[in-house]
Amino acid sequence: MKIVDARVIVCSPDRNFVTLKLQTSSGLTGVGDATLNGRELSVASYLQDHVCPLLIGRDGACIEDTWQYLYKGGYWRGGPVGMTAIAAVDMALWDIKGKTADLPVFELLGGKSRDAVLVYGHANGATAPEVLEWVGRYLDEGYRAVRVQCGVPGLQSTYGVSADKRSYEPADADVPTENLWSSERYLSFIPGVLESVRKHHGFDFHLLHDVHHRLRPIEAAELGKRLEPYRLFWLEDPVPAELQEGFRLIRQHTTTPLAVGEVLPTVWDFRTLITEQLIDYVRTSVQRAGGISHLRKIAALAELYHVRMGCHGATDLSPVTMAAALHVDVSIPNFGIQEYMPHTEATYEVFPRAYAFRDGCLHLSDAPGLGVDIDEAAAARYPYRRAYLPVNRLEDGTMHSW
Ligand code: CS2
Ligand code: MG
């Protein structure tokens, strides 16, 4: 079963997506997501110019060997661009493998460990009363886990807080928007918001919060400690993830569970975090971390150290990634939770999918392969538009971690 065609499709139904479509001599096709938010065309070129020519004529059945060939053969290992490109190839080959066997991919990963995938929704608001209202709406809709983000008094805009309460689209401009940040203002305000969420809505659901990499370790330690009474499911990205040793300091001071790693692409980037048990949840994704094949290795290492998986699932990960993530989530033993932000109707028109939200969970169908596709005619109606993630500055103008 040779790969006879490899095409990169770039489209923008409300946001940009890069999709790889492979075709085999047996007539089957497979899709993979190669979207790298704010840097989309770099992965499109990496695939088109440097990977697709290597795929034509290869045996499409050899998923692991193709992964190793692209990872080791590239010489320049790792990095977000290369790992996203490899992820797209890997997803497409698993899709084809499933279709060849006429089985959903989760059956090839060992079968189901659970019936459905617990997800969390996103309640964000400019003010605390707005947040409380939206937490209530999510609970009424059956969500069992809700992430809470709130605007901070004195700061004009805050990352993760938007007019749209179902999802938010941070890549919002063709030059980066500039946000202001103050750890002092944030730290004196946010514990009160989480306290009022528990006061109004109780403890009978999972409560999550994302710091978006903005604190220093000692500040994060203080925050974790102050949030303990509100029993968070997790506190996400309290500090930038690349300094793995920084988590030792946070861990010494707080029992609030920590989730990290939506920006980390390889198992090596997680090694200290996992083996020293510095975190509780791994946040990377099928799309960021080299596809199903490599994510499973990260999950297996995490399993040994009692760390669970909580994959990234914002809207810059296309429905192809969401479908692929669900196959991993439903099959691994150390699943924790899956992030879920519904895509827009235009996005679902381009990517017909076979998963659905019900009772606080996402449910997969038994469709062979990943159970998702790309409608190329629909995609062609939505051309690429340059869009950047915002940058973040301190009040004195200093560039800060976004
Ligand atoms: C966020 C994302 O979903 C999350 O947890 O941190 O909004 C993230 O910042 C974007 O996906 C970046 O592309
Ligand atoms: Mg995050």
Image (spheres, helix red, strand yellow):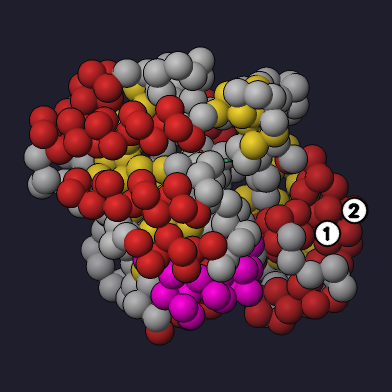
Residue at figure coordinates x 35%, y 31% from the top left? 188
Give the residues in magenta.
265-282
Left or right of 92 on screen, residue 224: left
Identify which residue, 94 or 163, lies in the foreground: 163
Q: Quadrant of residue 267?
A: bottom right
Asked whether the beta carbons under mark 1 and mark 2 sit within 8 Å of each other, the answer is yes
For the residue marked with disc 1, what is the amino acid?
Answer: Cys
Q: Is residue 279 magenta?
A: yes
Instruction: Judge depth for marks 1 and 2 and give the one in front.
Output: 2
Judge whether 262 appears above or below 156 on screen.
below
> Percent x, y for residue 171?
62, 29
Say if 227 sits above or below 83 in the image.
above
User: Which quadrant holds the N terminus?
Assistant: bottom right
Q: Secondary structure at mark 2?
A: helix
**Is residue 231 visible from the viewing direction of this image?**
yes
Q: Which residue is at the front of the view, 204 or 181?
A: 181
Q: Residue at x 48, y 35 (%)?
A: 183
Queried whether the magenta region covers residue 77, the answer comes back as: no
Label 1 element class: helix
Q: Residues within 10 Å of mark 2 (few under 14, many from 20)?
A: few
Q: Quadrant of residue 356?
A: top left
* Mark sitting on residue 52: 1
Q: Which mark is residue 49?
A: 2
